[in-house]
Image (cartoon, grey):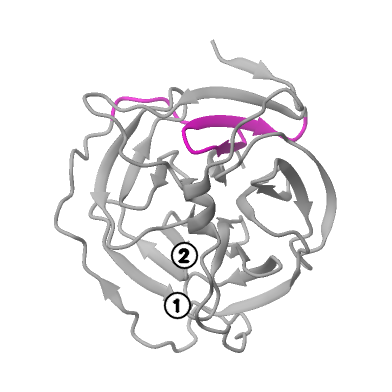
Amino acid sequence: MFRLISIGIVFLSACSDYTVHKQRDQTQPNEEEVPVAPADTGVPVPEVFEDTGSSLDTAEPNIETPDEPVYLHTEATLYAWDPLDGQLQLIGDFWSIGSELSEGITDIAIDGLGRFYGVGSEALYGINGHTAEVWKIADLAFPMFGLTCTSDGRLVGGGDGLYEVDVLTGAITTLVPEGRFETSGDLVGLPDGLLYWAVREGDDLVVVDPNSGATSNRGDIGVERIFGLGYAHGALYGFTDAGIVLEINASTGAVISSQSLPGTWWGATTNPVVW
């Protein structure tokens, strides 16, 4: 049975390696923003990064559909959180049958069918949201620091730019090219079909049309190092590595409210199954 942990009780240690990844110096200035455009707007043919050719053990365990509104995690541990009662629910430490994870999970995502994914610096993983079991799906061409699913089920990862990730092979297709915006720590897909992305510096809230790659800067959030984004009960939430949860105005990027949620949060996800 899962353990309920009240806000203010959980204290988790920082991980310097992850902080280094999240705070890479941006080597290129942001390009001028492009207003979000309809899906049929002409865009260049996207650059495709082939997968590395090693799709490993893709057999999913027989698992139940995740049923919590928001999941979040540290380097090694998975939690669920519901803003209505403010409680953290410990799911467990990430683990894998037959082998140990060689890296931390940098972010997580769930699609509308309840398939639960995670990424790290090296690979794409499947995750059991009830037990925190992890299994490797495929190697990645380069590290991902943010992850989400679009409202129609596509998996999108963020780093310097945004990339659609093939959920079977790990092959990567460019959605927003590098040099325009760099992920602070996460992005999240909302029921309106758009992607909401926390980018450095500031952090700013950038909205992306996942069909065209067009972007629009909604505004300055005013809080840096937002490493997780989630959505529940019609509200957008950000989670910082300093243990703060923010309710964010999705139209302007402004912080509506903030409270302590002690932990060094690496990532978060909404759960479209319970929308």
Position of residue 154 relative to residue 211, above or below, is above
The residue that appears at 66% across and 17% down in the rendered structure is 4
Position of residue 142 relative to residue 88, above or below, is below
Residue 262 falls left or right of residue 76: right
Residue 248 falls left or right of residue 79: right
> In the rendered structure, does residue 64 fall within the stretch colored magenta?
yes
Specify the quadrant of the image occupied by residue 144.
bottom left
Specify the quadrant of the image occupied by residue 96.
top left
Q: Secondary structure at mark 2?
A: strand
Badge 1 crowding class, 10 Å Cα cut-off, few under 14, some 14 to 19, many 20 or more, is some
Name the quarter where the N terminus is drawn.
Answer: top right
Q: Which mark is residue 90?
A: none
| First in residue order: circle 1 vs circle 2 | 2
The answer to whether marks 1 and 2 mark residues whose Cβ atoms lie closer than 8 Å is yes
Where is residue 243 shown, x and y percent of the image?
70, 40
Where is residue 153 shown, x and y percent of the image?
43, 54
The residue that appears at 24% across and 49% down in the rendered structure is 138
Name the quarter where the C terminus is drawn.
Answer: top right
The residue that appears at 33% across and 70% down in the rendered structure is 173
Residue 98 falls left or right of residue 127: left
Amino acid marked by disc 1: Glu
Badge 2 crowding class, 10 Å Cα cut-off, few under 14, some 14 to 19, many 20 or more, is many
* Residue 151 visible in rendering: no
| Residue bearing the label numbered 2 | 159
Q: CA distance from mark 1 to mark 2?
A: 8 Å
Amino acid marked by disc 2: Gly
- In the displayed image of the protein, which residue is found farthest to the right? 257
> In the rendered structure, does residue 137 fall within the stretch colored magenta?
no
Q: Secondary structure at mark 1?
A: loop
Position of residue 268 relative to residue 20, above or below, is above
Highlighted range, magenta? 61-84
